[in-house]
Amino acid sequence: MSFMKEFREFAVKGNVVDLAVGVIIGAAFGKIVDSIVNDLIMPIVGLIFGKLDFSNLFVALGTVPEGTPHTLEAIRKAGVPVFAYGNFITVAVNFIILAFIIFLMVKQINRLKREAPAEAAAPEATPEDVILLREIRDSLKR
């Protein structure tokens, strides 16, 4: 089998297409969660902890040039290495929220899958030979 033919068979399998759709939707969903964390949750958490801005929590690992504003972006532009633990906190909260939402989605999908066969299951029709045997039995009893 040629390499291209084998690749084509692999690429058009249903699971590969489903995976591609999942990755694309996951990337878009990740952006939504990122916005929720950065624009909604972290400002509230920062307000609770005394107007703390997590994005600017860092430790400069080198000498900061004089006159450079004390913000993460400005110090990085100055070429000073930084230990940006505030950014890590934001990303960690983002991950926890995303993992929790995915957990809830998978749990709901599994619950729906378990319920679907119970609703769809129709009573099986009794075979004709069993019906005839029951009729014979009932007529012999009389």
Image: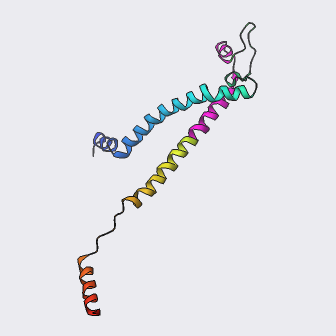
Is residue 18 inside the magenta stretch? no
Image check: 49 left or right of 126?
right
Is residue 89 inside the magenta stretch? yes
The residue that appears at 47% across and 49% down in the rendered structure is: 109
* Residue 32 point in image, percent of width and height: 52, 30
Up-down relation of residue 42 to residue 132 (above or below): above
For this orientation, the residue located farthest to the front is 142
The residue that appears at 66% across and 25% down in the rendered structure is: 43
* Residue 19 point in image, percent of width and height: 41, 41
Q: Quadrant of residue 71?
A: top right
Whether residue 85 can be seen here: no
* Residue 3 point in image, percent of width and height: 31, 41
The residue that appears at 69% across and 27% down in the rendered structure is: 86
Image check: 128 left or right of 66?
left
- The segment highlighted magenta reads 72-99
Whether residue 66 can be seen here: yes
